[in-house]
Structure formats: structure tokens, C-alpha cells
Amino acid sequence: MKKVTAFIGTPRKKHTYEAVRELLDRLEALGDVECEMVHLTDYRIEMCRGCKLCFEKGEEYCPLKDDRDAVIEKIMASDGVVFASPNYSFQVSAVLKAFLDRLGFMCHRPRFHGRAFTSVIVQGFHGGGKIVRYLNFLGMCLGFDVVKGTCATALEPMTEKEQRKRDKAISTQSRKFYEALSRPSDHAPSMLMLMGFRMGRQSVKYTLDESARDFQYYSEKGWLDSDYFYPTRLGVLKRSVGALADAYYGRKYIKRGPG
Ligand SMILES: Cc1cc2nc3c(=O)[nH]c(=O)nc-3n(C[C@H](O)[C@H](O)[C@H](O)COP(=O)(O)O)c2cc1C
């Protein structure tokens, strides 16, 4: 049984909620999937103060004592994760953004490997596509296996045409997400994820030293010398591209030096 948790950036049970419900119902219908919806507004998520202690010393040094880690635990306990939000002023809602900012340290020390990720954005008229692209990218940085998100348009009342369009997009998204959930845990990464790993690793290796939290994290995980974040078999092409990326970024970061 696979566990999927959707984190929703609004307390309203309207269009965003309904779009997520549609996605989760379809996933459950595909079989062996158990879903949960979590409203982020039910958790206390404070706004990042920008002290950077999480980057420099570690996330446990964050001065904010709230529910950040409880939400992270829920993600860690999931095989698949959905971030969902209405489009507010061309971005995710404030509560989702507050949570994403609090995950900033994880762009340095990604942790969500082996978990599928997708997003649902619901807009009134415009701008949701860019938010979906932002979440696709952020999901990759956090280590997720990303399935491109969906943007639905829902002016009130939602027309039948809008509803059909939303359902069609969510039906495709649910099948792709289900495939991602069913992948073996050692599946080969995409070329983009592989390149991202090699770039990040060379940067950590050549611009930091043992005193840096990111260096210690990469070292503990064995990432300073591994092929990828997790054990996997790379084909000839990916091995060659990986070696080229190591050489290119290695030179770049050696030249840049520490700091
Ligand atoms: C504060 C606020 C800002 C909004 N900004 C945008 C926007 O920039 N672009 C857009 O297309 N819709 C915008 N909308 C409309 C919502 O995205 C749309 O009504 C959506 O369906 C709301 O989701 P909900 O039904 O789950 O609450 C905004 C709505 C609110 C309340």
C-alpha cells in the first residue's frame, strides 16, 4: 500500500480542495493507494526570519519553535506528496510559501528522495502555469521524483467546460503520478536530476570544507563520491554525461575556490 499526502495551502474547501480530491480519488481508484489531505492552516508555520542558522549550522538551530518538523515528518512518512494552492497574486498562498521558505535548507541538503511529487494550482484567470513550473523546480531541488503539476482555472461558478478541462488534466496527472509511485526505489534518475546532483556535489566538494554543515551532510550520505543520491545503475550515456558534468563543475568550483 502506497501512502500519498496532499498539503493544501488554503482552509477553504472549494476549488483547490475539489481539484485535489479529484486527483486523490483517481489515485485510490488505480489501486493500493491510501490518501490523506492536510490543510497547512491546521499547523503553526511561522515565517522565516532569514537568520540562515539552518543553512550554516543546521535546521535544528532554527529559532522558530512551531510545527515545521511535524509537517516534514508527514512528508517523510509518505510515498507520494502533493502541494496544492490557489493562485494568490501570481504565487502560492502565503501559508504554503511560509512552509516552502522553512524548507529552504533542504535545497542545500535534500532529503525527499524516493518520493513522488506533484502539484495542483487553481487560478481565477491567469498566472498559475508559472507557479506550477516553480513548484516542479522546487520539488526537484528538494529531492523528489517530480511529476509535472496541473493548473486548473475556476472562475466562479466553474463552467462545465472548465470542469471537463480540469478533469482531463487531472486524469493524465493521476496516471503519471501513479507510475512514479510504482517505480522501483533504485530507478535511474532523469538527465536533469543527474546533472543537478553532480553540479551540487562538486560545489559542496570544492567550495566547502569539513566545518560546513552541507559538506558533513554530503559526506555522511556518501554523496561526495557516489553516482547519485541513492544507489542506482546508470546507462552508458548517463555515466558519460555524469563524468563530463563532474569534470566541468569540478573545474568551475575549484577555480571559484572556498566560500
Ligand atoms: C487574495 C487573492 C488573490 C488572487 N490572485 C489571483 C491571481 O493572481 N491570479 C488568478 O488567476 N487568480 C487569483 N485569485 C483567484 C483564485 O486563485 C481563485 O478564485 C481560486 O479558485 C481560489 O481557490 P479556492 O476556490 O480553493 O479558494 C486570487 C484570489 C484571492 C482571494
Image: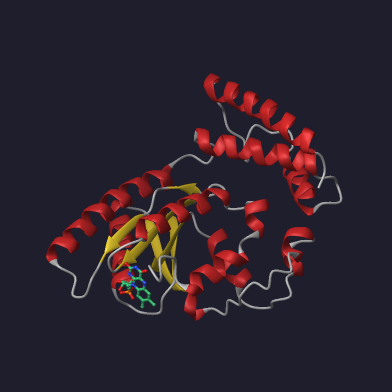
Query: What x and y, as percent, mark residue 211?
Result: 86, 51
Residue 21, by quadrant, is bottom left
Horizontal side, residue 124 vs residue 72: left or right: left
The answer to which of 158 and 33 lies nearer the viewer is 158
Residue at 73% in and 64% down: 52
Query: What x and y, as percent, mark residue 155?
Result: 23, 71
Residue 235 higher or lower than 103, as above or below: above
Horizontal side, residue 123 vs residue 190: left or right: left
The answer to which of 52 and 74 lies nearer the viewer is 52
Give the residue at the far right of this rendering.
211
Query: What x and y, as percent, mark residue 41?
Result: 48, 79
Residue at 61% in and 75% down: 47
Horizontal side, residue 165 vs residue 170: left or right: left
Residue at 77% in and 46% down: 220
Query: What x and y, as percent, mark residue 124?
Result: 28, 69
Quadrant for ligand 1 reads: bottom left
User: Where is the N terminus found, in terms of image quarters?
Assistant: bottom left
Can see residue 187?
Answer: no
The answer to which of 122 and 7 lies nearer the viewer is 122
